[in-house]
Amino acid sequence: MRKIVLLLAILLGIAPAFSQEVPKILLLKERAVLQDELLEERFKSVLPNLMRKNGIDMWVIIAREYNEDPVIKTMLPSTWLNARRRTILVIYDKGESQGLEALAVARYNVGTIFKSAWQPEKEANQWKRLIQIIEERKPKKIALDVSEQYAHADGLSHSEHEALMSNMPAEYKNKVTSAERLCVGWLETRTPREIALYEMLDRITHQIIAEAFSEKVIIPGVTTTDDVVWYLRERVADLKLDTWFHPTVDIQRPDPDKVNWPYDRRPDVEVIMPGDLLHCDFGITYLRLNTDVQEMAYVLRPDEKQVPDYLNKAFSAGNRLQDIMTGFFKVGMTGNQILALSLRKAEQDGVVAQIYSHPVGYHGHAAGPAIGMWDMQGGVPGTGEYSINENTAYAVELNAKVKIPEWGNKEVRVMLEEQGLFVNGKVHYIDGRQKTLLTIPRRQKVEHLGQ
């Protein structure tokens, strides 16, 4: 009963911020009901304002089975795993007093939101029926999912675009525009219930990492980094969840001949030993949302009961860099502006920084402003020029490089990634953030602290 009460509290957004209860994983049927509820809420609370803000009164989304538009995948009901044949969705804004009209140029209703508006027995040509709908409503602007900058907003295939435009009357061709801002806004905006759910997703992610980086999984001298990677995958499968990328686990150690993992390939498979500094990159997919988390652990030597002070001091540089970057979040600031200001401030504070943060949501690397990439520290063309908006979620991803005299002045990278929500003008870590290294074996209580 206590777990059920906690779950309801989380869904309502009133759960204690750092509860130690294990969140209940919903059954598939329960997930389906919740996902459909969330979708209906988003159509009422997110989409009308988004269309009016961007001056779009008609949005046409087209996809064929097994070649889904990234946006249409987020608008399908929970029991539709793919588009069917050719699925055309039309969203028309009838004005503030009448709201949105949602139609499906398809044989079937698409869930409870999109009502079927095509009877092939009366009009066999699907494109002609779409044009009839357009001509009946006379939209001022028709938005299509085409974009040079965002793959998320470029879901209309070349052949489908050609077919549509060849059927489009001349008077409406000049009304066609890119739906890029609609796509990004739809994908990046989180509702209050989604924000509450993200606490549960992030907590589950943290708990799986805590298990993987513990004596439950790791036997120094025996366990390899690849063993831990596959434990993460198996644990996700056991919980009936998904992961959107194959995890990585890598090692840093005093050995002068060992080079830090280069980002352009997967880490080497190595046996984990006492004195190793471990790092993982891991995320889950649940309720159509994604997490992306990086945390670190230290394997205690036989004569150690706690992490050496010099490593704790190095780790704090990573937290300092997080504070620097999130301190520059402000509505209207672009990803490139935040990146430049953060790197400048880090240099002033003596932090050797590398920043590569990104939005999370319906996708792990989600739509919204890119705040650096590991190989683009001077700014990211296109997506880096997109501005920060309220009610959005980010993977605060970065590293601070610290030279360790005790390791022969070798450079250690404190690589961290935590989920942050930008709400009310401030970044809030969803389930806290790592402030101390995990230890193997565990000598301390695992806890994630707030800001």
Image (cartoon, grey):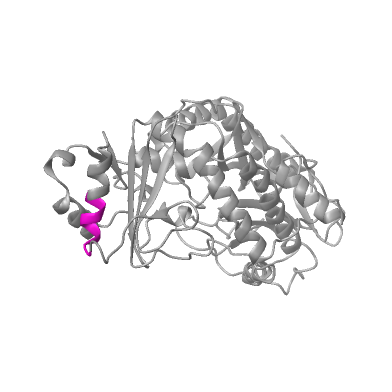
The answer to if 126 sits in the magenta stretch is yes
The answer to if 247 sits in the magenta stretch is no
Instruction: Name the one closer to the observer, 326 or 390.
Output: 390
Q: Could you tell whether 345 is left or right of 176 in the image?
A: right
Magenta segment range?
Answer: 124-131
**Image height of 285 relative to 228, above or below:** above
Residue 48 % position (x, y) = 45, 35
Any part of residue 284 in sight: no
Q: Residue at x 32, y 40 (%)?
A: 58
Instruction: Name the one closer to the observer, 236 or 72.
Output: 72
Q: Residue at x 53, y 30 (%)?
A: 342
User: Which residue sits furthest bottom?
Assistant: 222
User: Which residue sits furthest front?
Assistant: 122
Residue 337 falls in image quadrant:
top left
Residue 401 % position (x, y) = 59, 42
Q: Could you tell whether 223 is left or right of 166 in the image?
A: right
Q: Could you tell whether 78 is left or right of 208 in the image?
A: left
Any part of residue 444 in sight: yes
Magenta stretch: dominant secondary structure: helix
Instruction: Name the one closer to the observer, 154 or 236.
Output: 154
Residue 20 % position (x, y) = 83, 50
Residue 230 % position (x, y) = 63, 71
Residue 107 falls in image quadrant:
bottom left
